[in-house]
Image (cartoon, grey):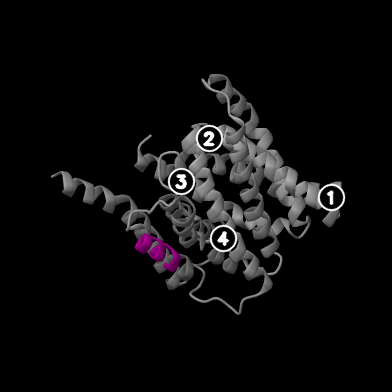
């Protein structure tokens, strides 16, 4: 897979996440965040498991203990990002949450430099600023006084940044995206439901009433989109992946306009343009500079 194809895969993952954001918010009326995240990722783990087993049979080498621990850490970061996002949605708006979660486009290159001592292409920094500005405009061009939910959303962005960096690191070393996906889903589900047992009441009726949202985010937003994320990150860098994944805010707004009749203000269209420009910049500028050096 070429880098350009990998970035298109990441774009598809972002489109799916954008479509699932409303489902995450509406389900919170009937089921608590820990049980929502736990059931969501349990569905995703079960859906991906047969494919991961097939991948394992084709693999020439078994996972080492260190590699398995690495995959577990990806799952822990996924749990932290998913649960802080859901808790934040209890006391903030979808608009604020989508903007503040998008801060991971800034955190990913910083984490890459600090943790891995890898310096991304210089175009990532202006590209990240463009994407962040686009998300801000897409959210309406303003953020109300920070609520508790907003602070949870900022913390969520930190954990998403860690998850993106860790996923890119480990899939590049083991070359088994489905094993990584199944493991991180299972770890996230186990941790979420373990906390849910002690912190949240749950009933069959509550789960049944949220079944449509759980199935969508479990099978599509998680089972499919996170697998696409891991596959795409095998062939591109974590900072570049963050730029493309940040377009979930763009797709969320566009799908809301198409499916729910919501209208974008002029600043929203400007935000879409900035996010699209950020993706073009990080995709085309490195290629153009490389060709100039070899010419």
Q: CA distance from mark 1 to mark 4?
A: 26 Å
Which comes before the other along the chain, label 1 or label 2? 2
The tag on residue 157 is 4
Q: Which element type, helix, strand or loop, lies under badge 4?
A: helix
Q: Which residue is label 2 attached to?
A: 177
Query: x, y (%) of residue 142?
Result: 51, 76
**For the residues marked 1 and 2, what is the alpha-carbon distance in whole angstroms?**
30 Å
Query: Alpha carbon of mark 2 to alpha carbon of mark 3: how far?
Result: 14 Å
Disc 1 crowd rating (10 Å Cα; few below 14, some 14-19, many 20+) is few
Quarter of the rendering containing residue 21: bottom right
Is 75 positioned to the left or the right of 5 in the image?
right
Give the structural element (helix, strand or loop) at label 1: helix
Which tag, 4 or 3, sits closer to the chain's start? 3
Frontmost residue, 197 versus 244:
197
Q: CA distance from mark 4 to mark 3?
A: 18 Å
Residue in the image at 85% along x and 53% along y = 198
Task: Tell me if I can see residue 260 in this picture.
Answer: no
Q: What residue did someone put label 1 on?
A: 197
Q: What element does badge 3 sit on? A: helix
Q: Based on the displayed image, in which of its 4 quarters is residue 218 positioned?
A: top right
> Callout 3: 10 Å neighbours few (<14), some, many (20+)?
many
- The stretch in magenta equals 125-133
Residue 277 on the magenta span: no
Q: Which quarter of the figure is the C terminus placed in?
A: top left
Q: Quadrant of the N terminus?
A: top left
For discs 4 and 3, the disc positioned in front in the rendered view:
4
Residue shown at the point (71%, 40%) measured from the top left: 42
Find disc 3 in the rendering and name its residue: 10
- Mark 1 vs mark 3, foreground winner is 1
Please tell me which of labels 4 and 2 falls first in the chain.
4
């Amino acid at each position: 897979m070429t880098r350009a194809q990998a970035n298109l895969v990441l774009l598809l993952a972002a489109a799916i996440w954008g479509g699932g954001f409303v489902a995450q918010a509406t389900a919170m009326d009937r089921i608590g965040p820990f049980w929502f995240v736990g059931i969501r990722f349990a569905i995703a783990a079960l859906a991906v498991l047969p494919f991961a087993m097939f991948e394992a049979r084709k693999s020439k080498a078994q996972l080492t203990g260190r590699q398995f621990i690495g995959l577990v850490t990806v799952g822990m970061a996924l749990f932290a990002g998913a649960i802080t996002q859901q808790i934040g949605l209890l006391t903030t708006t979808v608009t604020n949450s989508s903007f503040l979660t998008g801060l991971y486009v800034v955190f990913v290159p910083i984490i890459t430099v600090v943790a891995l001592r890898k310096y991304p292409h210089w175009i990532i920094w202006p590209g990240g600023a463009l994407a962040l500005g686009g998300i801000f405009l897409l959210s309406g061009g303003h953020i109300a006084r920070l609520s508790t939910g907003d602070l949870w959303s900022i913390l969520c962005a930190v954990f998403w940044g860690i998850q993106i960096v860790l996923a890119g690191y480990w899939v590049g070393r083991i070359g088994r995206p489905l094993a990584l996906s199944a493991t991180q889903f299972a770890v996230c589900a186990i941790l979420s439901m373990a906390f849910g047992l002690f912190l949240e009441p749950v009933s069959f009726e509550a789960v049944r009433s949220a079944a449509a949202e759980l199935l969508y985010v479990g099978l599509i937003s998680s089972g499919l989109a996170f697998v696409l994320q891991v596959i795409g990150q095998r062939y591109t860098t974590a900072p570049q992946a963050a730029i493309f994944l940040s377009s979930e805010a763009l797709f969320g707004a566009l799908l809301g306009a198409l499916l729910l009749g919501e209208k974008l203000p002029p600043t929203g269209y400007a935000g879409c343009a900035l996010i699209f420009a950020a993706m073009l910049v990080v995709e085309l500028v490195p290629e153009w500079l490389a060709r100039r050096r070899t010419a």
